[in-house]
Image (cartoon, rainbow, N blue to C red):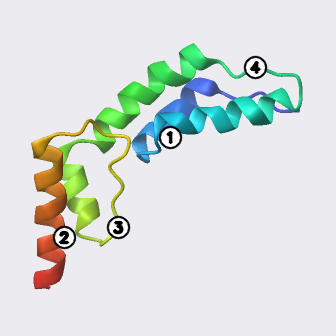
Amino acid sequence: MARIDWFQAGMSDGRLGIEPSYFSVYEQLCARRSKTPDREAYFAAYREGVRSYCNPKNIYQIARTGAVAIGACEDSAVIRKAVQDGFANLLEQ
């Protein structure tokens, strides 16, 4: 069985804006095989990856496509404005 690089998994999930609660799915899947995911490595990388995802410029660009999820981002006026502006730009096209 291949070993999972939990640092890379966390980085990837963060960059995709996957909510941190998704880690519980990994825990459940690993438990079926008597394994334990590396929470520390995962979340160290996740925090780094989610910063790039939750950048207002990135959120704006994604919102311009018509599909953006911000559940992984801190709730802030800047993020909400990036979503609004991106959707508004989409509607103007």
User: Is residue 12 shown left or right of residue 25?
Assistant: left
The local crowd at label 2, few if under 14, some if 14 to 19, many if 20 or more residues have their Cα within 10 Å, is: many
- Residue 61 image-quadrant placement: bottom left
Q: Position of residue 46 (x, y in %)?
A: 45, 29
What residue appears at the point 30 percent right and 33 percent down from the top-left corner? 51
- Residue identified by numbered label 4: 36
Q: Position of residue 68 (x, y in %)?
A: 33, 60
Residue kind at label 2, given as amino acid type: Phe
Q: Earlier in the sequence, mark 4 or mark 2?
A: 4
Secondary-structure class at tag 3: loop
Secondary-structure class at tag 2: helix
Which numbered tag is attached to residue 21? none
Whether label 1 touches label 3, CB < 8 Å: no
Which numbered tag is attached to residue 13? 1
The local crowd at label 4, few if under 14, some if 14 to 19, many if 20 or more residues have their Cα within 10 Å, is: few
Q: Earlier in the sequence, mark 4 or mark 1?
A: 1
| Total numbered labels | 4
